[in-house]
Amino acid sequence: MLGRTANGLYWMFRYFERAENIARLIDAGLRMSLTRSGTGDDDWDGVLQSAGVRETYDEGHSKLTSADAIDYLLRDRTNPSSVMSCVDYGRNNARMVRTALTRETWEATNEFWIELKALLSKRLKPAELPEAIDAIKHRAGLIRGAFHGSMLRNELYNFARIGTFIERADNTSRILDVKYYVLLPSVSAVGTSIDNIQWESILRSVSAHRSYSWAYDGEYRAMNIADFLILNGQMPRSLAYCYEKIVSELGYLAKDYGERLPAHGTADAIRKTLQTRAIKEIMDQGLHEFLEDFVTRNNQLGMEISDGYRFYV
């Protein structure tokens, strides 16, 4: 398969996953701001940092407000990671590989783009945000469902899935970091009702509230929630689950192409870390430091996949 086709599929699904994930990050910020007194503008510093756009936000804004931060994350075209920008980029990649996609996948992609342009044609009011976030998650899910239900399980499918799970792992680690490192009011709040409410908000933002209650009998403890989102291989947004899928899809490519690349070793090493580390060890050594290292290694894997499969040839 041509490198540019692999590149188009990989980034198409990374961008659509990122659009949904940015919406989820906004949702996390909105939910946690409800647990604070005051305007809650300071909460968005952490959200912007976790989205990796704090510096670019400052370039176009003289001060930080919740309204400006939300608009920047949702619809600002100067922000390459805004939901609108990601959907634009995702659709452009889909157009580039149009002949490699089923009709159902292309139609779901085009409908997402059309609906989002109308939805984000103007700045949203606070009361409109929950419905908009739900619409973004719904449309992104329709693209995944159409693709999953209609595509051959070949290399096209493998590259799309790898892009999805690399992006998802990045997002889960960033949402955890928003809560644990940036948004927690103070060390004295650890274990208090406000701490528990914020952890519950994290679960709701990644659609894991009910599944967590099944796994841990509904007891909101920071260590259990971190374990669920990092090490639980049954949770579809956990880091462990994402890397099981990444290693599996890379394995299919290695079999098809008859060779292993540096990316395979990197993915195996990250999966082994997630299989062998205990959550108590991670928390004792520093959750923020663990997540920061994970994001770096996850980004390295993305670059190795791009280089190894010659995405730009």
Image (tube, rainbow, N blue to C red):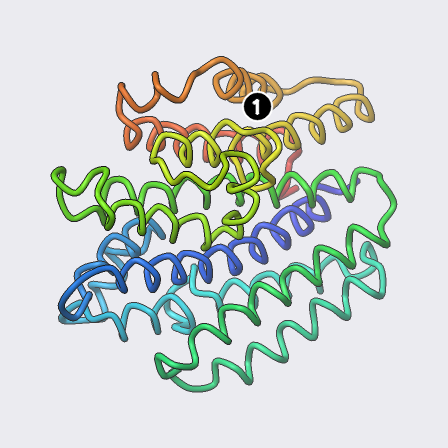
156 vs 224, nearest the viewer: 224
On screen, 277 above or below 88?
A: above
Q: Residue furthest top?
A: 276
Quarter of the image holding residue 126? bottom left
Residue shown at the point (44%, 28%) measured from the top left: 297
Position of residue 94 measured from the top left corner of the image (x, y, whole percent): 70, 61
The answer to whether residue 106 is left or right of residue 120 is: right
Q: Secondary structure at mark 1?
A: helix
Residue type indicated by callout 1: Ala
Q: Quadrant of the N terminus?
A: top right
Residue shown at the point (40%, 56%) measured from the top left: 25
The answer to whether residue 32 is left or right of residue 19 is: left
Question: How dense is the environment of label 1, judged by Cα within 10 Å: few (below 14), some, or many (20 and up)?
Answer: many
Position of residue 231 measured from the top left corner of the image (x, y, whole percent): 50, 27
Position of residue 239 measured from the top left corner of the image (x, y, whole percent): 51, 33
22 vs 32, nearest the viewer: 32
Residue shown at the point (55%, 21%) measured from the top left: 271
On screen, 42 above or below 197?
A: below
Residue shown at the point (78%, 59%) measured from the top left: 146
62 vs 205, nearest the viewer: 205
Position of residue 216 measured from the top left corner of the image (x, y, whole percent): 49, 34
On screen, 228 above or below 157?
A: above
Q: Quadrant of the C terminus?
A: top right
Tally of numbered discs: 1
281 vs 249, nearest the viewer: 281
Quarter of the image holding residue 81? bottom left
Instruction: List the residue tagged with mark 1.
Output: 267
The answer to whether residue 181 is left or right of residue 301 is: left
On screen, 126 above or below 13?
A: below
